[in-house]
Image (cartoon, rainbow, N blue to C red):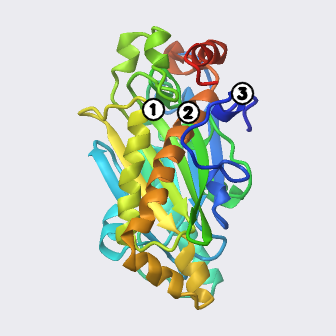
Amino acid sequence: MMTARPRARDIGVRIGKYETRQYNAITDVPGVAVGHTTLIEGHGPLRIGHGPVRTGVTAILPHPGALIREPVEAAHYVFNGAGTTAGLSLIDEFGHIETPIVLTNTFSVGAAYDAVTRHTIRTALAEGQTPGWFSPTIGETFDGGLNDAAGLHVREEHVFGAIEAAAGGPVAEGSVGAGTGTSCCGYKGGIGVSSRRVRIGRARYAVGALVQSNFGGDLVVDGVPVGRLLAQQVAATQDPGSIMVVLATDAPLASRQLHRMAKRGSFGLARAGSSGGHGSGDYFIAFSTAYRSRLAAGDSAEIATFAASEGLLDPLFAATADAVEEAILNSVFASDTMVGRDGNSLPGLPLDRVEELLRRHGRV
């Protein structure tokens, strides 16, 4: 389901100084693919196990090959750890990701873990490998305001469906996949993506971001305090909430450098209006596709250059913050009003009023 609502850039918002790439999406990093399974069923009062259901699964594949055979260099950063994830300790220890990255709701992390395990075993067997030890990478935010979260509606086939639907090109945003039931700064949140292109020496690199926005605060658009100016309810904006951020690049970064890059994503989160409250779960997972693509071709000189010159990372750091900020905005811009369990409603951001405010402040 592709939203008909405009993205932030469609109404003239320009975040930062770097250009986007073709799709302004994480899939602008060559080889990266994204797939969703969206679950929307039922209306009315909550009946645990029956609905209403407003949830889903989003899968990010770093490359089209078998990750269990060709893992990617990776790192993560936790700004505030009030969340539930799987696989991050392996990233800390070994510096790589060896399965699809799957996002879902909090109570479905276990189901997603089991499903990714089964899918990876199946992939290994198809490759003629005997499956060894590995650890799936799973992230979440809580969508219980709209969704029958305790009903545990995400099943193996939904995770398989998201993985197998993963494709390059434009990415569906808003109330899709893992963002189906999420909120952001008192408005309907969801999935958002963005990308940047940077030049370092004679080479060009891509940085892409995908977010599952579910955090509280007062929404800020390109420095304009839109949430406060729209006088959104205080109670709605004070919920600390959470966010999952997945970052991709084709720059040849080692795990330690990807950790540094992941930390810069928190600047984009702050600029969009989050203050990282006590109960927030703010997770950033970063990976590079370069070791698979460049080392296979024997291009180790470029990797050595980055290892020796940390100052070269500055454009990537800035691009990361910009891409995260714009991905968050896209997640909210793309989401219409949604009604969930017990008639709970999250309003879509009123884009006509937002555009008026941005014009008044000289942003568009």
271 with respect to 300 (left or right) = left
- Sequence order check: which comes first, mark 2 or mark 1? 1
Q: Residue at x 50, y 76 (%)?
A: 71
The residue pinned by badge 3 equals 5
Q: Are marks 2 and 3 in contact (CB under 8 Å)?
A: no
Residue named by callout 2: 329
Q: Amino acid at mark 2?
A: Leu
Q: Residues within 10 Å of mark 1 (few under 14, many from 20)?
A: many
Depth check, front residue: 144 or 222: 222
The quadrant in which the N terminus is found is top right
Residue for point 44% across, 75% down: 306
**Residue 305: x percent and y percent?**
46, 80
Quarter of the rendering containing residue 239: top left
The reply to whether residue 110 is in sight is no
Tell me which numbered mark, 1 or 3, is placed earlier along the sequence.
3
User: Element at badge 3?
Assistant: loop
C-alpha distance separating marks 2 and 1 = 7 Å
Give amino acid for label 1.
Answer: Ala
Q: Quadrant of residue 351?
A: top right
Q: Which residue is mark 1?
A: 272
Task: Confirm or deny contact between disc 2 and disc 1 (CB under 8 A).
Answer: yes
Cα distance in 3D space between marks 1 and 3: 19 Å
Residue 201 placement (x, y as % from top left): 56, 71
